[in-house]
Amino acid sequence: MLFIPCSAAATDGNATMRLAKTLGSKILLLLLGYLLMAGVVRLAHGQQRYPATALQPDCVQFFQLASVTDGGSFDNRQVGCTTWTVAYQSTGFTVISLQFESAPPGTDTTPGAFVAFAGTLVSGINPNTAITQASSQFSGYFPWVRINATALTGAGVIRGLLYGYRQPNVASVAISGNVAVVGPTAAGAASTTNPVQVGVIDTTGNVVKLVGNANGLFVQGRSAAGSIPVNNPTPIGGLDNGGTLRSFLATSIGQASVSSPLTGADAVGNGSLGSMVNSAAGGVGYLGIAPIIFNNTTWDRFRSASLSNFPLATTLTARNSIGAATTEKGSRWMVISNPAAGSQATASIAAEASVRHVVDCIAFSAAATTAPALTALTVNVRDGATGAGTIIWTYQVAIAAATGQSVAPHSICGLNLTGTTNTAMTLEFSAALANLIESVSISGFNVN
């Protein structure tokens, strides 16, 4: 602040005016710049303030641009600032390209050719293209620097501040909304200084630090990968009915698995409803709750109907559908045949690619209004077409030489007779018989 001696003010009321004229306009401008730097400097971006007690910039240049031009060259030869910040706000323009530039010395009083700043871009972009507000940080010494509006679209004005410091790393803290700390070493490069470490204290009072690899941060334990842990890790699991902790295990490739310590009847009530399903090596493991059933020796998980757990009806010997829950099969197919007297009844569902037909229910009967010949017939289920497929179920009937109900109606469900993939399924009388009226119905579901 500028003080006027009281004696001068008292003896001459025009002392202040005469002093101002004596100092001249140039000196007043210098004083104004000093007052701005010694007091509060307002940044256009984020409206952050540096109080008078804070470290003041060594190099300061205000700029205001309304057209494609530069904001004037800044002579850095005597000050020697090495870290820079450009902050600005803009109104009215729809396109902006605001570039921070450097130049070598030219003559004794003029710079050489300006180019985009040849030092290091610490944060932000150069040129800046934000049409509202932005800031960027740079490092590097050059004799001359300036701000240059290389492209502007529309009518508006850009107001901003270029400031710098002679001390290295002063501009490492970028004040623009949130505070971002930028270290002295570039990302991906070997550290040349001691970093700020982040870690925890173990039970012995030693620091266990967090380390990282190319993929980012991870926690490194005390035991090497693949070795038996020397400390007790935090387990994931539960308590059995005896109060013992049973934890999840992992495979050699790091996938989670479940190891049940109890088998057979002892496993009843130990909470073993959890099931961990592992995928192939390198895949993803899934944890879920699966219902299980006891086979009097071990616990088996329920399995859905599929080609792998449904045996063919033609090869029932030594085949088991372990854990196959088939109490309800969903939608069913159905085929019927009820031809005229003297014709063979045969109901067949056609083959389907990648599908096995499973016979669930069959029904058959026969009647006559004119006495047929006394004959023995069979009712067959064939894994295949009429008269050709393998017989997987058969029923013998005798036809009396009389009128009336020759074969009483029969209906059987719950057969679960599984056919061959891509093969028809048929229910039929073995032959036609004169005067005999035959009837068959077959229904089931598909497995694929």
Image (tube, rainbow, N blue to C red):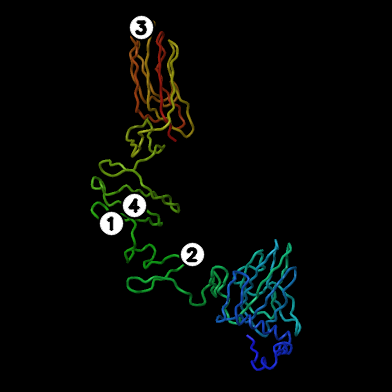
Q: Disc 1 to disc 3, how far (Cα)?
A: 76 Å
Q: Is residue 211 above or below residue 275?
A: below
Percent position (x, y) of residue 41?
61, 77
Mark 1 or 3, closer to the camera: 1
Q: Residue at x 34, y 23 (%)?
A: 412
- Image quarter where the N terminus lies is bottom right
Which residue in the protein does label 2 denote? 216
Circle 2 residues within 10 Å: few <14, some 14–19, many ≥20: few
Percent position (x, y) of residue 388?
44, 23
Which residue in the protein does label 3 denote? 403
What kind of residue is marked 4?
A: Val
Do the CB atoms of the residues marked 4 and 2 lie less than 8 Å apart? Answer: no
Q: Disc 4 to disc 2, how far (Cα)?
A: 29 Å
What kind of residue is marked 2?
A: Gly
Circle 2: element type = strand
Circle 4 residues within 10 Å: few <14, some 14–19, many ≥20: some
Q: Disc 3 to disc 2, how far (Cα)?
A: 89 Å
What kind of residue is marked 3?
A: Thr
Circle 3 residues within 10 Å: few <14, some 14–19, many ≥20: some
Q: Quadrant of residue 313?
A: top left
Mark 3 and mark 2 lie on one chain; the one further toward the N terminus is 2
Circle 4: element type = loop
Mark 4 or 2, closer to the camera: 2
Which residue in the protein does label 4 denote? 258
Which residue in the protein does label 1 denote? 245
Of residue 29 and residue 228, the one placed in the foreground of this image is 29
Q: Residue at x 58, y 75 (%)?
A: 49
What kind of residue is marked 1?
A: Leu
Mark 1 and mark 3 lie on one chain; the one further toward the N terminus is 1
